[in-house]
Image: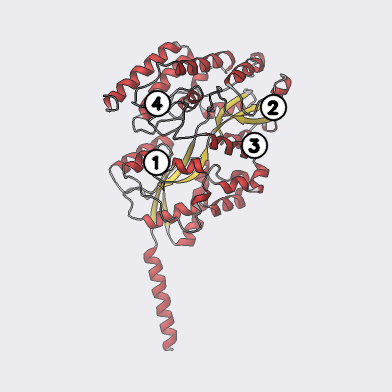
């Protein structure tokens, strides 16, 4: 009898210790497909750990605003944040993020794709764990290329793209040679145009932070883009972002589209695309200078310095960005729907490769992007399609508005570049970069 009481007491002690160590963590995330999936699967983590999750799900711009305000004031409202590669180096250097040193022995940090890992590390320390990653690539209609007697090179040049777009345009049939982003925004048209400018040897700033829009490389970039879109792009292109161009491509209206590698699974999905079985892939174009016009991005999970529940937060991040999570998604939704672009092992998995014909090119595109050396010339900033400085969001969107106006015919290429140069110089002087 005494032994039974002893055992019961021990069991109660263990149970109460478990209850005491359980925590409720608050996770701020963006309302997109992969994150919705993460919420759907999270009860498995809660059941396994005894922890609970309070979700704050927001539209991207609102998320960024709320999270930035909270972290800057060390408000401690959130324990896990969903942030982009843009924020990671800026916030880590301000000591706003906790380094992820305890993700567990089986996490396998070495399996993270080197380019993505570098983008979320500062001085060799991981400050965020990538949930999914992407670059950009060329997507094209194999049937239209065949009909026109054209062959897409594995590494197309801008000259080839310009020439092919003219030949592939059939306005009477509502088919346009190329679709590209035109909607103004640092993450919309400027993601494409900054990546494109890298391939032409342009850069946002020289090593003394002087803006470079008055240089010939930027003129070549913007002129090529505007001429290409006016000759071979769809009407109203200055209003088109990622989603609008995806809809056009899936409806059979675009012969070529250069955009995010994550789009590859959408354009080849017969449920969503009318041309699913007629899509080919190639690297984003180059201008013969050794750089492709492809970007580098990841959505990541990070812990703000204000969190009081670091241990539970780290456990969640290790679970959601670990190898077993990919297997869990595959068991529920199939390998084609696993979050892409973060781990080498995914691109060595025959089950994934079998259902993702775009996988190898996605990996090659991510590998070709270099956040530390984005352009042909040296730069003082980190980032491929953005400069990782706090001022970039505002400046990038303002410049995007000038370039969108050049595309719509509201101003000339020269006027747009002059306006971009003036406003960027003004902001960089005000912020103290230029003396």
The residues bearing labels 1 and 2 have C-alpha atoms spaced at a distance of 39 Å
Q: Which residue is mark 4?
A: 396
Q: Position of residue 408 (x, y in %)?
A: 48, 14
Report the residue marked by disc 3: 269
Residues 31 and 311: in front is 311
**Quadrant location of residue 164?**
top right
Does 76 sit left or right of 130 as displayed? left
Point out residue 100 in the picture as x, y percentages from the top left corner: 41, 51
Most foreground residue, 312 or 85? 85
Q: Position of residue 344 (x, y in %)?
A: 56, 46
| Front in this rendered view, residue 428 or 43 | 428
> Sequence order check: which comes first, mark 3 or mark 1?
1
Indicate which label's residue lies in the foreground, 2 or 3. Answer: 2
At numbered mark 4, what does the secondary structure look like: helix, strand or loop? helix
Q: Residue at x 39, y 54 (%)?
A: 25
SS at mark 3?
loop
Q: Secondary structure at mark 1?
A: helix
Whichever of callouts 2 and 3 sits on the residue coming sooner in the sequence is 2
Task: Give the residue at x 41% y 36%.
Answer: 86
Residues under labels 3 and 1: Cα distance?
Answer: 33 Å
Q: Which mark is residue 88?
A: 1
Q: Looking at the picture, does residue 87 appear above or below residue 428?
A: below
């Amino acid at each position: 009898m005494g032994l039974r009481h002893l055992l019961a007491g021990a069991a109660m002690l263990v149970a109460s210790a478990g209850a005491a160590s359980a925590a409720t963590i608050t996770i701020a995330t963006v309302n997109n497909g992969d994150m919705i999936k993460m919420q759907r699967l999270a009860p498995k983590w809660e059941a396994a750990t005894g922890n609970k999750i309070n979700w704050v799900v927001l539209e991207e711009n609102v998320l960024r605003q709320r999270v930035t305000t909270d972290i800057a004031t060390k408000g401690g409202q959130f324990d896990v944040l969903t942030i982009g590669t843009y924020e990671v180096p800026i916030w880590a250097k301000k000591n706003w993020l906790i380094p992820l040193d305890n993700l567990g022995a089986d996490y396998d940090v070495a399996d993270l794709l080197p380019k993505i890992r570098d983008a979320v590390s500062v001085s060799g320390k991981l400050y965020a764990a990538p949930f999914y990653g992407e670059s950009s690539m060329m997507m094209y209609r194999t049937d239209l290329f065949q009909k026109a007697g054209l062959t897409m090179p594995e590494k197309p040049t801008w000259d080839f793209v310009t020439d092919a777009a003219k030949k592939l345009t059939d306005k009477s049939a509502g088919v346009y040679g190329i679709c590209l982003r035109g909607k103004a925004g640092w993450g919309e048209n400027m993601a494409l145009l900054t990546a494109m400018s890298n391939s032409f040897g342009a850069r946002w700033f020289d090593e003394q932070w002087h803006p470079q829009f008055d240089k010939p490389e930027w003129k070549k970039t913007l002129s090529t883009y505007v001429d290409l879109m006016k000759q071979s792009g769809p009407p109203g292109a200055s209003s088109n972002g990622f989603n609008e161009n995806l809809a056009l491509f899936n409806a059979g209206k675009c012969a070529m589209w250069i955009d995010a590698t994550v789009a590859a699974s959408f354009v080849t999905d017969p449920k969503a695309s009318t041309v699913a079985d007629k899509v080919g892939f190639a690297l984003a174009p180059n201008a013969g200078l050794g750089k492709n016009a492809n970007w580098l991005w990841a959505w990541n999970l990070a812990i703000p310095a204000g969190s009081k529940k670091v241990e539970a937060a780290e456990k969640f991040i290790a679970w959601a960005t670990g190898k077993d999570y990919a297997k869990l998604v595959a068991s529920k939704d199939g390998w084609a729907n696993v979050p892409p672009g973060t781990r080498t092992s995914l691109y060595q998995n025959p089950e994934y490769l079998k259902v993702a014909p775009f996988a190898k090119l996605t990996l090659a595109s991510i590998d070709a992007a270099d956040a530390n050396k984005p352009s042909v010339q040296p730069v003082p900033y980190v980032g491929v399609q953005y400069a990782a400085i706090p001022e970039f969001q505002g400046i990038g969107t303002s410049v995007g508005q000038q370039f969108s106006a050049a595309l719509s015919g509201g101003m000339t290429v020269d006027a747009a570049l002059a306006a971009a140069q003036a406003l960027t110089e003004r902001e960089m002087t005000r912020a103290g970069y230029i003396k």
